[in-house]
Every structure is written in structure tokens, then in C-alpha cells.
Image (cartoon, helix red, strand yellow):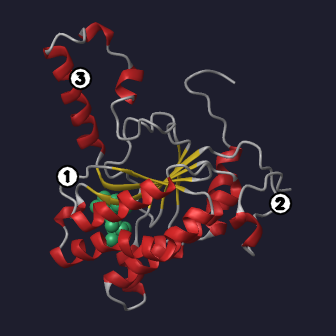
Amino acid sequence: MIKRVRSWWTRKDKVQPPERSMDNVPEHVAIIMDGNGRWAKSHGLPRFIGHQNGMKAVKRTSIAADKLGIKYLTLYAFSTENWKRPKDEVDFLMRLPQEFLALELEELIEKNVQVRMMGDREGLPAHTVNAMEEAVRRTQGNTGLVLNFALNYGSRKEITECMRELGKKIKSGALDPEDITPEMIDGQMFSKDLPDPDLIIRTSGEMRISNFMLWQMAYSEMWFTDIYWPDFNEQSLYEAVAEYQRRTRRYGGLT
Ligand code: IPE
Ligand code: IPE
Ligand code: MG
């Protein structure tokens, strides 16, 4: 039975989670949204239509996550390596946040969702950053689902930035290298205000991490599915969460 009613979405949306335990719901789910291009190809469509349909899956998944009581949903939308793609595809992807927010921001505000962005603002076009910053600003007081977009995100870049910052502090004499702790490193990451992901999902059948949250996933549970991201839906998320609930997390200890 659903024990918690967390938001408007919960009441308004027709699809209800299957009857299952709502205990032990992962607090932070992070998704490597992959397979837009192959989805499009399999339908005989251009890649950009795959990305557009991927945006619909973002909305569906956010609603489903909120309904399940997930507190943080991180979505890997553009990696630091995705700049290698053809310019017209990159340009299209850079317009998607605006397009998504133009359609959804008012509803996100109404649904108490807090939008965040994790990644390097430098290098992103101004129109992309402006759209994201407006969404972050207008939702910062919200207390519901935290919807965190990993945009121009790369874990190695994040770790490199962290090391630079700590290096500067050491050089200035403000920090003794002996005093560096894992918590201090956490505090330098783009993800500093988020708990580590409990569950990481990757769609499209690829079994790799592609430079995503390497530091933060030390004890994350992983769930892979062959489904292409534009086909990901409520049921897919429930399956992932149900599998998570069947696992025993030991963190190196014994149960
Ligand atoms: C994921 O889909 C979206 C991004 C990485 C931006 P892809 O565009 O990687 O789709 P495939 O992997 O080519 O099918
Ligand atoms: C990972 O997907 C990045 C995002 C989902 C944003 P990619 O499609 O870029 O990953 P690779 O190239 O297959 O590893
Ligand atoms: Mg891909």
C-alpha cells in the first residue's frame, strides 16, 4: 500500500505504483539516460526525435519518482564527452533544457519540485545556463522532489576541480594535507548538497558508467535495463526500485 502521499502528482496521475512495500525506497536515484539515438533509429526516425522523446521520459520518470517517495532524482543529460558529437546534435541538446522548462517549469513550481544543476557552467551556451538558472532560482524554496540535472557533467572533471581547490588551500597554507578527509572531498564536489546515490540506473543495455559520479557511487546499487531511455516509464522505475529493495547493502560489513 502507498503510505505516503507527497504531492499533487501523486493524486492527479492515473498510474499508481504496484502494491509493494514503500519502506526502504532509495533516497537518491541517479539515471544514465541512454539510448535516445538507437530508439530513433529503431523507429526509422532522426536522432533528434529520440532526444525529444527522451524529454517526455524525463517528465514521466520525475512524476513516478515523486510518487514513490524518492527524494533526489539525478538525471545525466549531457556529459563532458558529449561535446565530441556533431555540432548540430550538440546544438539541439543544448536547446532541450529551455524547451523542457518552457513546457514544464510552471508545473514543477506548482508540484513543489526543486530543480538543481550539477556540472560545469563554463562551456555551456548562455541560453542553456540562463534557462537552468531561472529554474533553479524559481524552485529553490521548494521542498519536494529534488530534480538534479547533470549537464556538462563529468566525474573526472569534478574530481580534478576538487583537487585544484584543495591544492590552492594547501599552497596558501590554509590546509594541511594530513587534514584532508573523505568528507572534505565530498564538500568540494558538484554534488556536495546531495547524499550519495543509493541506486544508479542505466538504460539501453550498455554496462558502463561513462564518467558518471565515480566518487559518489562507491556503495551505490546498480540496475541495468535494455530499454531505451525514451521507452522508460513508471513501471521501469518500479522494477528498478523493487530490485533495489530485494538487495542487501553491506558496505563491506556483515549482515
Ligand atoms: C542519450 O542517448 C542522450 C545523451 C547522451 C545526450 P544517446 O544519444 O547517447 O543515444 P544512443 O546511445 O546513441 O542510442
Ligand atoms: C552517457 O551516455 C552520457 C549521458 C547519458 C548523458 P553516452 O551515450 O554519452 O555514453 P557512451 O559514449 O556510450 O559511453
Ligand atoms: Mg549513448
Question: Gap in Å between the C-alphas at discs 1 and 2?
Answer: 45 Å
Which element is circle 2 on?
Answer: loop
Circles 1 and 2: CB atoms closer than 8 Å: no
Q: How many marks?
A: 3
Circles 3 and 2: CB atoms closer than 8 Å: no
Decide if residue 121 is on the left or right side of residue 107: left
Which element is circle 3 on?
Answer: helix
Q: Which residue is mark 2?
A: 19
Q: Which residue is mark 1?
A: 122
Question: Gap in Å between the C-alphas at discs 3 and 1?
Answer: 20 Å
Q: Is the C terminus in the top left, top right, bottom left or bottom right quadrant?
A: top right
* Tag 3: amino acid: Leu
Q: Nearer the viewer, residue 37 or 254?
A: 37
Question: Gap in Å between the C-alphas at discs 3 and 2?
Answer: 48 Å
Q: Which residue is mark 3?
A: 166
Which element is circle 1 on?
Answer: loop
